[in-house]
Amino acid sequence: MPDSTQIAHGASADAHSEHPPYLRHHFESTEQQADAAGFAMWLFLLTEVMFFGGLFTAYLIYRNWYYPAFVAASHQLNVFWGTLNTVVLISSSFTMAMGVWCAETRRKSGLVLCLILTFIMGLGFLGIKSIEYREKIEKHHVPGFHYSMQSFLDPASDPEVFKEYHDKPLAPDMAVHTELYFSLYFLMTGMHALHMIIGIGILGFMIYRAQVGAYTSGHTTFVMNFGLYWHFVGIIWIYLFALLYLISRHQ
Amino acid sequence: MSEQVQHGEHEHHIVSPKVYVIVFFALLVGTAATVWASYVDLGLWNPIIALAIACTKATLVVLFFMHVKYSTKLTKLTVAAGIFMFLTLVSMTLADYISRAWGNW
Amino acid sequence: MSATIVSLPDQSSARIPKVNYITKENGILSWLLTGDHKRIAILYLISLSFFFFIGGALAGLIRLELLTPQTDLMATDTYNKVFTMHGVIMIFFFLVPSVPATLGNFLIPLMIGAKDLALPKINLLSWYLYMAGGILAIYTMATGGVDTGWTFTTPLSTHYVNTNVLTTGLAAFIAGFSSIFTGLNFIVTIHKMRAPGMTWFRLPLFVWAHYAASILMVLATPVVAIAIVLIALERTIGIGVFDPTKGGDPLLFQHLFWFYSHPAVYIMILPGMGVISETISTFSRKRVFGYTAVAFSSVAIAIFGFFVWAHHMFIMGISNYAVLVFSLLTMLVAVPSAIKIFNWTFTLYKGSITFETPMLYTFGFMGLFTIGGLTGVFLGTSGTDIHLTETYFIVAHFHFVMVGGMLMAFLAGIHFWWPKMTGRMYPEKISQLAAVITFIGFNFTFFPQFILGTLGMPRRYASYPPEFQILNVFSTAGATILGVGYLLPVLYLTWSLKYGAIAGNNPWQATGLEWQTQSPPLTENFVVMPIMDHEAYDYEWLERQKEIEVTHAG
């Protein structure tokens, strides 16, 4: 029966005679598929931006409302660990970017090495984070779990922090708001850590697949898109570090 | 690596490791700078500088690690849309809080 | 109503095409594990109808209670649960996914000349997330329900109720991801998978509408997701973000909630407007007036829709300056919607109008959405809003736009594309009757509520002053008629699956790539990739095609 649409020897069909196994049937070419996948990943990252956006909004409001409490509470965070974590994440972004380069230039062992380094640094980040969290738990600075504002009512009772910052005692009605700071701290770093855990899990999978050459034979989409995710998680940390750790460290 | 260039959009620009190394060191410098700045009393400028450094670092990661500098217009537009939407959420919500005649701002 | 554009093949010799997306594979697993966007659309259609009738039953209970001024049918707490679940189910599990997940999923690849959506597995995942959220919502209802209103306003929802806020929140959270993935899929598909020659300005306006709605789905939904997470933590751990005693601000929840929920209403209505563009063109035999204006106004609605959320919070405690700014911006957002109504009206002018069922629903939409939209302007004006908010005026406003507007558009679309999806025509007379019954029932149900609201009857109350009874009785009577109007399509559409006339490729003589394929379509949509060489709504092109067919037959 006559078809009212013209027969299409689609423009791409001539130039592209290969039909690699990873080309899904609803795509006309591997370029289109890779393009679509990359775009989809960016859109997903947009949703993540908006997801964290709500938390940043909350943070900005309460930091302005309760600045003294936020300053005092932020002194409980260890700048050394935070900076180290930042360096670890930035380095892992570097190794991840190098990993993408290895995939694009078909360097299989290079890719595996970069992925392993990224993986290790991701674990390192989580390890440092757990050290920090442990400290918070020990000091009863976890909201909802016997939260104690003693360190803020009487800073001298916390000699480690006191000798660095000599904070003045907060009035009780301001000290109460340090709990809000820690709520946001755990929320934001916790949500970030959750994304790290997911990323590390996927990295493990990718290391195995990279070993068998899945990403170094022209089909680099997965590695590239995971790289986007990993860098994004790093960017979130860049802001968390600046906002949570570095409110004000001068006396 | 001699993939055919198709019609329409494409980017096979492979970013060289040199760029990554430079950006990596820039990020480390930025980190050091922001930590140092937080120990100096610059009054109102402290949060501004901290955010400015963070934004610069983020921009470097987006442009180079995430290849946006070498990407299509669509990708750049998408990133811009995300930033714009985020800023809308934050600024319009804050506008309410800032302009309240009561409260703690 | 005697003229019709319906053109069916000769019924004695016509057959449903043997190979189509329904017959391609058999067995329940081939449906439950499908990647075919058309099958997923049908899965959605069935489950959506199911949730719609549950939400409708809850509505029936509301109207029954409101027959009398006293709280006599159910306890006040129960009534609170009934209207809350009605809202939650209707919004998250019916209205938001309705047109996009059924018609959008089915038609967008066909309309742009693609074989499927960009991410078929994500599409299937969307449906499973939807089902998970929906089943969780039903479970919530069965185990005691939630009574905070669908808006979960803090600190009521975090500190003062003992009901299933967490599970309902989780259900909405999961459904939100379903929505996000659908929108993400549409955006990627529309950008990357258009057939050769299918430029942006040759796309059907249905696609533009879905594109705009998808932007909203992707950017707005995550914010309500984090709002729900915060509520969950506030309820369980007591983190303090919404707790005044700990320095938190309950209003922050509302900012985050409405940042999504206002764009959500545009997520709900835009796809419906896309349907209207298609039906109004087809049944006037005329291209949509001002194609570019309609296309851009869809995007404008999406963008402006992000800037007005606090008009839901005028009396809640935001600053006076915020009230001023958001009120002004709300005036702005009405403009693109009005542009659409004007353009559709001008499409009708000097068109050859016929009154098939989709067109009846379309006319219903035009009138009812206009009324609903205009009342939105009264509410956007902060002065009048102070009087009208939290009254039945609001209830009437959003039911006019959502039920009189969106649901009518959904039914218009279901009827319009039913022959394409199933290969069968529905029976015309009874469907026209159902459309008229729906329209009458709708007006009886919701118009009195405008009056009730202006007179001061508050919403979300099980009891009311006796002088409001007569209007409430009208409203309940209307609801009964409305129920009949909605039940009829279920019956005759199901009937038509077996006994309906064979539809053929293009029973409406419509333009659009989906009508150039068989009904029901093949799994891969097109045997060869179509090349788009004409503008959208090009009825001259269609005439030339028919001439070719006539001269080339046999």
Image (cartoon, coloured by chain):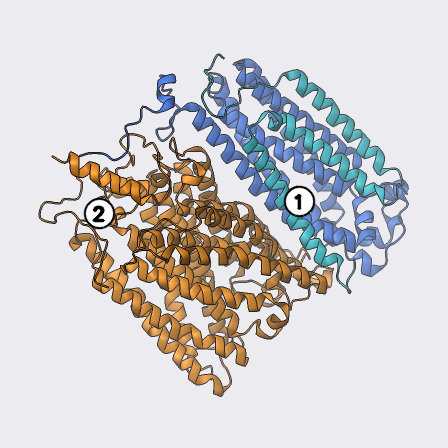
Residue C415 position (above or below residue C468): above
| Residue A60 image position (x, y, % from top left) | 73, 50
Q: What residue is at 73 percent from the left and 38 percent from the top?
A: A241
Which chain letter goes with mark 1? A
Viewer-proximal residue among A95 and C267: C267
Residue C124 appears in which quarter of the rendering?
top left
| Residue at far front of view | C350
User: Which chain's colour is cyan?
Assistant: B
- x and y percentages locating residue C483 in the rendered image: 33, 69
Image location (x, y in percent) of residue C88: 47, 61
Q: Where is mark 1, residue-wise?
A: A188
- Residues under labels 2 and 1: Cα distance? 52 Å
Helix, strand or loop status at disc 1: helix
| Residue matched to label 2 | C423
Where in the figure is residue C329, as x and y percent of width and height? Answer: 62, 58
Write down the quadrant of residue C21 in the picture: top left
Q: Which chain is orange?
A: C
Which of the pair C396/C373 is nearer the observer?
A: C373
**C293 above or below B27?**
below
Looking at the picture, tell me which residue is in the foreground, C333 or C71. C333
Tell me where residue C490 sits by quadrant. Answer: bottom left
Residue type, numbered disc 2? Gly
Q: Residues within 10 Å of mark 1 (few under 14, many from 20)?
A: many
Q: Quadrant of the C terminus of chain B?
A: bottom right
- Is residue C42 rendered to the left or right of residue C473? left
Q: Amino acid at mark 1?
A: Met
Q: Is residue C128 visible?
A: no
The chain in blue: A
